Every structure is written in C-alpha cells, then in structure tokens.
Amino acid sequence: MKHITRVFFSLFLLVVILASPLKASEKPLLRWGGDTEGGVPYMFYDPFNMDRLIGYEVEIMDAIADYLGMKAKFVQNGWDNLIPGLERHLYDVTIDGLEITPEHKEVVNFSIPYYSTFLQLAVRKGTKNIETLEDCKGKVVGTLKQSYAYFTLVEAGIQDIRTYEDEINAFNDLENGRLDATLFDDPIAVYYAGFNPEIVFVGPPVGRMDYGIAVRKEDKELLSKINEAIVYLRDSGKLREIYDRWNLWSPMMAEMFQDFSPRNVEASMFNYWAEHQKPEITWEKRINRYTSFLPILGKAALVTIKVSIAAMVLAILLGLILAMTKIFGPTFFSRIAIAYIEAIRGTPVLIQLFFIFYGLPNIGIKLSPFVAGVLGLGLNYAAYEAENYRAGLLSVPRQQMEGALALGMTRWQALKHVVLPQAVRVALPPVTNDFISLLKDSSLVSVITMVDLTKAYGQLATTYYDYFGTGIIVAVIYFLLGLPFVRLARWTEKKMAVAVKGGKTQKNSNSFVGKKPGSY
Amino acid sequence: MTRAAEPLIHVENLCKSFEDGEVLNGISIDIKEGDLVSIIGPSGCGKSTFLRCLNCLEYIDSGTITIAGVTVSRTGKEKNLNKKFLEACHLMRQEVGMVFQSFNLFPHKTVLENVMLAPMVVKKASEEEARETALRLLEKVGLSEHIHKYPATLSGGQTQRGAIARALAMNPKVMLYDEPTSALDPELVGEVLQVMKDLDAEGMTQIIVTHHMRFARNASDYIVFMDGGEIVELADGDILFESPQNKRTKDFLRHLTEDVA
C-alpha cells in the first residue's frame, strides 16, 4: 500500500514538472487565440509539413505583431470558446473569421474590419431547382453552428437546418445526399468544396460579414494599436498582398479598400493548397502521409497520457479519502462525502470541466488548462473510485477489523494494515477498468484548449479530408495506450487471487453491510 | 476454591444492552492468575458478549472491569464515550489476547507475517525481534512447517493454532477464546485444545466460551454457567456436571445430555 502510494505520488510530481512550460523570448509576446481544426484557409497546419502553422490570418497576425515590435504566438482553443478564452486571459486577442455582430460586441471590442466576405450557397452537381436562398425552403441545409450563416438561414425561414462543428462533414453530407444545400463563408466554400467536382456553387453572394480581431473590453490601448496596425497594413498594400496570395481578393474587398488595381502577386498559397487537393493519391503517398502524422499524434498522445495519469492519481487518492470518510467518518463529514459523490456522479464531466476552466475565473481562481483538466477529470473520477473502494471495504468481513483491534491495534492501524490491503484487492480490478475509461474521457480536455489525441484527430482529419484513415490510426493509438492497463487489471486480479482463493474472506455473510459494531 | 487477595481479573456489576434488549445484567466475577475458566450456557445467554466486553470489542454500559491493573469503568450516566474510557480500552486490549470462532487470520498475509504484524505495528518491535518471537510461538503451536503459507491453504485447526500464536505474540496476560473449536471438523478439535492445555500448564490465564463440555469439565479449573445475562452458577467441573445447585443449570445440562443421546 505504502509503496503504491509513493510510486503514484512521484509519478504525479513528474507529470507536473513535465507539464510546466519553459519560456524564453526577448520580444514581448502577442498571444492570439484561434482554432486550427477545420481552419483552412484561416489557420491550419501545412499538409506538407505538419509542424508549420499557415493561413492568411496567421500571416495577418505575424504582420501586425511585426508592426508593433512584438512576436506573435498562437494559442489553440475551440472555435466555440474563443471569446470565453479571451476573457479568461488565455491570450491577448482572438482572430478566426469572427464576425463583428452586435451580440459579440456586447462582450468584447472589435478592431476595424480586416476582411469582408459573403455567404456562398452550394449544391450537389445536377441539382436543378436550387439557385437562391428562397429556393431552400423545404430543403435540408447545412452550415456551421452558431455562425452568421446559421442565423441568416433562420431569418430566411429555412425550417430544416443541420449544424456542424466541422465544415468538412457538411460538404461530405452534401455530397452523399444527406443535405440538399450548404451555406458557408465564401473562403470556406472555396477551400473546402471548390476542388470537389461533385459540388457546385450557385446563386449570388448572400449577405455581408465583416471579420474583426476581438480584444477584451478593458484593453483599450491594445485595441487602438491593433487598429493602427491594420490601417498601416491596408494602406501599404500588405493586406492586399496576403489576400492575393490566398486568392481571397474580391470585388467586395476592392470596394472596401478602395483599391481597384489588378492583381500583381500570384495566388501562390491557393495553388499550394490546390496541389494538395489532387484526388489521385497512391498507397505510397498515403503511407508517407500517415507516417508524417506520427510526431503530431505522438505529442498529442503524450498530452492524453499526462492528463490521464495525473487525473487518475488524484482520483485514487481523493477517492480513498472520500470512501473512508463516508464509511468511517463522523456523521457530518460522512454526509459531506456522500453529497460530493452524488453531486459529481449526477452531473456531466463536460459541464464540470467548463465550470472549472471558464467559470472559476469569475471568483478569481484561474487555472492552467493542464491543471484544470486534471482537476476536472480527477475530481470527477474520485467519486467513482470512492464507490469502488467502498465496495472493497464492505467486502472485508468485520471480524478482520475486530481481530486487528483485539491485537491492540488502533482503528487507524487496523484499517491501514489489515482492512485496506484486503479492500484494495477487491477494488483494484474496477479501478483499473476506470482508468481505461478515463483515458478515453480525457478527450474532453480538448474543450479547454488542450491538443490531445482527439483534438489532433480533428485537426488532421479536417486538413486532409480524411476522417477514415486518420480515425483508424487514432483508434489504434487509444487502444495501445489502454492495453497495458487491461493487462495490469488482469495481472492484479490474478495476483490478488493467490492470497484469497478458496479462503474465507470471499464469504459475505458476515461483512459490514448495514451494521456498524460499537467498537468501530 | 481459594482466592488470591489480588485477582488478575476483577469484574463488578457489568451491564450491557443492545437495541433489542439487555444482554448482560450485572455480572461480577474475580479470576486469579493461571486459571483456566470455561463459560457455558444456552445460546443468547450473553456469554460471547461478556467475553467481547473483556476485550472492549463491545463497550460496556456500566460497571467496572480491571485486568492486570488496567481499569475500564462507566457509571451508565455518560452519554458519549469519553476519551479516557477509549484510551483505557485500547490499553486493555493490549493485555488481552483473543481468538475467534472464524475469520481469524489475515488472509493477505502469510502465517509468519500474521504473527509478526501486531508486535511491529503496536509495540514497534524490530523485524528481527518480531520474527524471532513469531518463529518460537509457531513452533510451540506446531506450525513450523507452514510459516510461509497463506491462511487459505491451511486447515481449520492449523488456522486456529496460528491465531493463538498471533495473539500470544503480543505477550498478553489473559487469553480469551470465543468458541474456538465450533467451526472445526471434529478430528481437528483435539489439536487446538491441546495447545490450550499446554498454555495452562505454563500458567497462562485463559477464559473459554465453549460448547465442548468434555473439555470444559476436564481441563477447566472451574466452569461458569450463564443464563439470561447473569452468572447462574460457578463451580468445579465435576461438581457442576454431577450435582448442579441451580434449577436452570440442571435444565441446561439435562437438555444437553438429551441432545447427545
């Protein structure tokens, strides 16, 4: 028992040390938040070199930081949570095709628009009767959730709207017939569907949306510096150059920037992406591609492992305390432990994670994503481990406790040397099983900005249009990570059985259940 | 019977009740050092509870118990168990060894580890010291060949002898046995009783709650007959069995012989 605790504790320390970041940079950092999942052409990892972050907004942020004498640093966060993450000081600004809307402006300030675009309707090749938004009434239309396009569809009176997290899935569903049409920001439509021969764009541009950089309300000075930088980049032609390279210049942009000159920079980045979209892909290329995933998936797997192990150590120790308090503690503390276990088991772990990461800062508790993730999962699983321990403790016949007390041990000594070691033997297999569940539940930390295996899967799959092959690889990695614990569970079960097999402790007729003898 | 001026065990007016009624109803008895005392009586008479009170596994409601100079006492007016009382209980348990009917040894430890555990944990004995004592005691109860076995692989008789060795390792002044042979196959009873006889010869004070009448009669210095939470009769084995004074004792013994016949 003592050894196990010690090993776990040192593992825990090791994980904490590994997780603490080391920083070294002379220029002040301009930390900006965005989501690389489904991020083409805004921000995404270069399909030909997965270590390199590219995208027209990446170039804009680099240019702005450069103008301000700062160094741009990207911080990953889910698109839905970009603004909560800003308020939580995860980064200084956020940019990711965020539309300047009255609702958004209530919570954050926006820079002057750096890009304007419209919505593009797309249908399957051969569709005859859909040409405008009006024609979509009575049809099934897909778009991103909570986006300008979504609200436009609602306003147009479309009844059947399907919302997606990733654009790629929407276009897939359009292609295979689940959707009749899609409505997306023009850059997304061009980059994700423009190369697909099965999909065609129809109708005139719909609506108008202005992208702005979001800044916290109180950071007035930063906002004016960013505006100054955008004006400079616009007037010096640097922004135009970026848009040309990414093939994002449009009549609407010409109007906005009052720049009607012809293109003088090649659409190099657009062509670079187009290169990647060529459908014929050999097995050799595919294998090379998957090999190139491994470092990224390896890094992400490490995050998954670190979070899972640290959370499990917390769950095991706290769970033990909870179980002991529930069974042996004074009534008052016992009730608290029961309330904790019931409350935690009765609410979703996702809500708990959101609450810890985005909610607690409201009362002044700011935790790093790693600590918040470990706490969220650890506090949650502690409740389940407590119940496992309780089952273990109740399976030990009460005569074992009496026997130890009769030998002159104190209650605590009896628990430590006699009851707990036996309880742990019963509890270990379910505890090990829970660890395998936790390993999988750790995918939830992607909602609090961490890039774990699941998040990496989303990033890779949306970049390569390949949920299938990538999915199999990621599933295999999860399986391999869990495998040692499956083996451990079997091994412990076998080892523990040696001492108890055919013994008297397995009979439950004389166990603690329902009675607490006076000597406890 | 002659009694020493200073009995090793002094019990006075001991009362104990559970939720469903009174179990011990004013027990008083003195037991001197070196005595082997058997307690008999019908089931539910309180004999096991009395034994458990002597080891503070059940806390008494009122009365006084003194064993080897340690006194546990309550007036019956206290609402809660106070700290002083609990400390006295803990001290008393260290003077008293106990063997139960079943579930005796710790199943996750070997026989040797079972015997070594309490001296190391409670008395902070060194491992060598504890091992030396344990080996000596295990030899005494005839388990030298089985010291590295786990309890699950032992016979019932071996388990009970191991339990006796484990209790002796704490060097108790008194040994209590709560029906130590009731769960055993008949052919294994003898080996356990023999250990108790050997201990008696060495001068150990022992109290045995038992249904084993022949052992009670032959080995005990005297027998206590309990019924309805009281000590009904206390007498030498032969006297009690052949000419019981009390009607309840007579009824009990008559039923017993009828059962046997």
Image (spheres, rainbow, N blue to C red):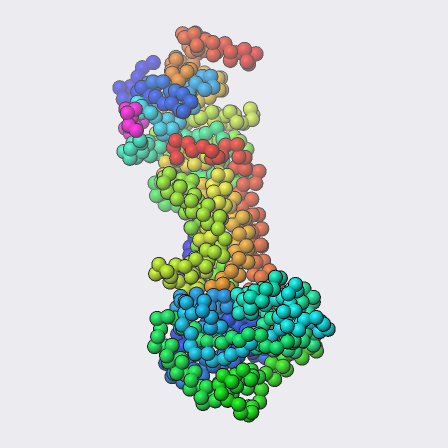
Res B87 visible: yes
- Relative image position of residue A146 (x, y in whole percent): 52, 65
Tell me what residue is drawn at x 51 percent, y 75 percent.
A209
Q: Where is residue A228 in the image (x, y as percent from the top left)?
A: 39, 83
Q: In this view, does B94 lie above or below A192?
A: above
User: Range of the magenta residues?
Assistant: B66-79
Picture quadrant of residue A134: bottom right
Q: For residue B128, which quarter of the picture?
A: top left
Residue B68 is one of the magenta-drawn residues: yes
Q: In this orientation, which residue lies closer to the viewer: B58 or A331?
A: A331
Q: In this view, does B239 lie above or below A102?
A: above
Dividing the image into 4 quarters, which one contains the C terminus of chain B? top right
In percent of the image, x 49 and y 83: which residue is there? A256
Quarter of the figure with the N terminus of chain B:
top left
Residue A11 visible from this viewpoint: no
Q: From the viewer's perspective, tell me whether residue A39 is left or right of residue A327.
A: right
Magenta-colored stretch includes residue A88 = no
Q: Is residue B249 left or right of residue A43?
A: left
Residue nearer the viewer, B61 or A339:
A339
Vertical comparison of A122 with B56: above or below = below
Find residue B37 and report its horizontal and vertical position in percent.
40, 20
The residue positioned 50% from the left and 66% from the top of the image is: A80
Question: Residue A150 location in percent, x, y?
Answer: 56, 67
